[in-house]
Image (spheres, helix red, strand yellow):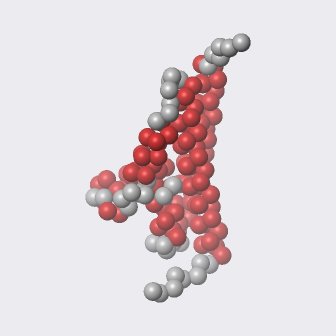
Amino acid sequence: MPCPRRPTPARSWRSSCLTLAAFLLYNLAFTLAGLIGFFVEFSGELAWSVELVLMLLGGATIPLSFFPAWLARPLELLPTSFIYYVPAEAYLGRIDGPHLVGAVVIAWTWVVLGFLGVRRFYELGRRHISIQGG
């Protein structure tokens, strides 16, 4: 097997930023799922459903490159693809140079939007919750 090429410092810095964004997006998805518990009576299976959606739409179960182009293009822009598919493609060297920079920018845009969404959902849930007890 050929040895993978050594990453340059700039490439490894971008890949590290992409990996951190993937970690944050994954956790934001489950935080949002947990916050739905403010509004429903039972949210036990919700985490399983979130994992299923993340893996199917994120390219972990079936790589997005196997999908038809008309479906793969929109899926590559969703935040789910930046959790599994895009970091794996960057690690394999299939995304490099300006495409890797673009992927990092899009991933961090999704992180910021996800954080704002979770914060807004938390505020709505905090106003909605009523705790009974003695």
Name the residue rendered at 45%, 72% in the picture: 94
Taking the image as shown, residue 127 lies to the left or right of residue 91, namely right
Name the residue rendered at 62%, 78% in the picture: 8
- Which image quarter holds the C terminus? top right
Taking the image as shown, residue 93 lies to the left or right of residue 59, namely right
Q: Position of residue 52 (x, y in %)?
A: 42, 46
Q: Which of 88 and 17 lies nearest the eye of the viewer? A: 88
Q: Position of residue 47 (x, y in %)?
A: 50, 40
Name the residue rendered at 63%, 16% in the picture: 130
Decide: is 90 above or below 73.
below
Tell me if I can see residue 9 in this picture: yes
Residue farthest bottom in this picture: 2
Q: Position of residue 45 (x, y in %)?
A: 46, 36
Decide: is 57 above or below 48.
below
Tell me if I can see residue 99 in this picture: no
Question: Splitting the image into 4 quarters, where does residue 61 fall?
Answer: bottom left
- Which image quarter holds the N terminus? bottom left
Decide: is 122 above or below 90.
above
Decide: is 106 above or below 44.
below
Taking the image as shown, residue 127 lies to the left or right of residue 68, namely right
Q: Position of residue 127 (x, y in %)?
A: 63, 19
